Image (tube, rainbow, N blue to C red):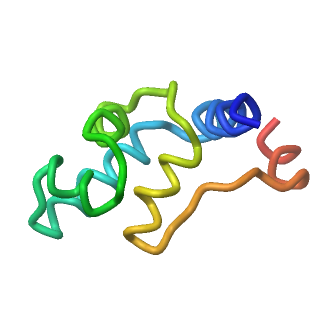
């Protein structure tokens, strides 16, 4: 199951630019007035998860990314087939 989640994040990273995710999280965190440490604690993830996301790293667990994105009312999910076909 963990491999599937990493594959979905890999597909996301190659369909979209990881810097978009990175910029979104960093901007929202700063707008909330939280340090990386404070935000990690609120999101229930390790500080390294926040740092990896904000640095645009691609080797992330989808479930951890979704924990972070949930703080802003967003989640990543699998692309539907029609979307994947349009971007091929």
Vertical placement of 55 versus 71: above or below? Answer: above
Q: Nearer the viewer, residue 39 or 27?
A: 39
Horizontal and vertical percent position of residue 34: 12, 61
Rendering coords of residue 85 (x, y %): 88, 44
Q: Is residue 33 left or right of residue 75?
A: left
Residue farthest along the bottom direction in this orientation: 73
Q: In the image, what residue occupies the spot 39% across and 70% down?
A: 72
Q: Residue at x 29, y 33 (%)?
A: 48
**Left or right placement of residue 17 versus residue 38 in this view:** right
Does 52 sit above or below residue 39? above
* In the depicted structure, whether residue 31 falls above or below residue 79: below
**Is 15 drawn above or below residue 40 in the view shown?**
above
Measuring 26% from the left and 51% from the top, which residue is drawn there? 40
Residue 31: x %, y % from top left:
16, 67
Q: Position of residue 17 (x, y in %)?
A: 50, 37
Rendered-image quadrant of the N terminus: top right
Specify the quadrant of the image occupied by residue 13.
Answer: top right
Whether residue 41 sits left or right of residue 13 in the image: it is left
> Position of 30 compared to 23: left or right?
left
Q: Number of labelled discs?
A: 0
Looking at the rendering, which quadrant does residue 61 occupy?
Answer: top right
The residue positioned 35% from the left and 43% from the top of the image is 22
The quarter of the image holding the C terminus is: top right
């Amino acid at each position: 199951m963990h491999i599937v989640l990493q594959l979905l994040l890999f597909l996301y990273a190659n369909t979209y630019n990881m810097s978009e995710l990175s910029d979104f999280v960093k901007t929202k965190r700063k707008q909330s007035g939280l340090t990386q440490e404070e935000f990690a604690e609120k999101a229930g993830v390790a500080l390294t998860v926040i740092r990896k996301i904000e640095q645009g790293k691609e080797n992330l667990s989808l479930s951890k990314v979704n924990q972070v994105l949930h703080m802003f009312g967003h989640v990543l999910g699998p692309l539907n087939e029609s979307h994947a076909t349009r971007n091929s």
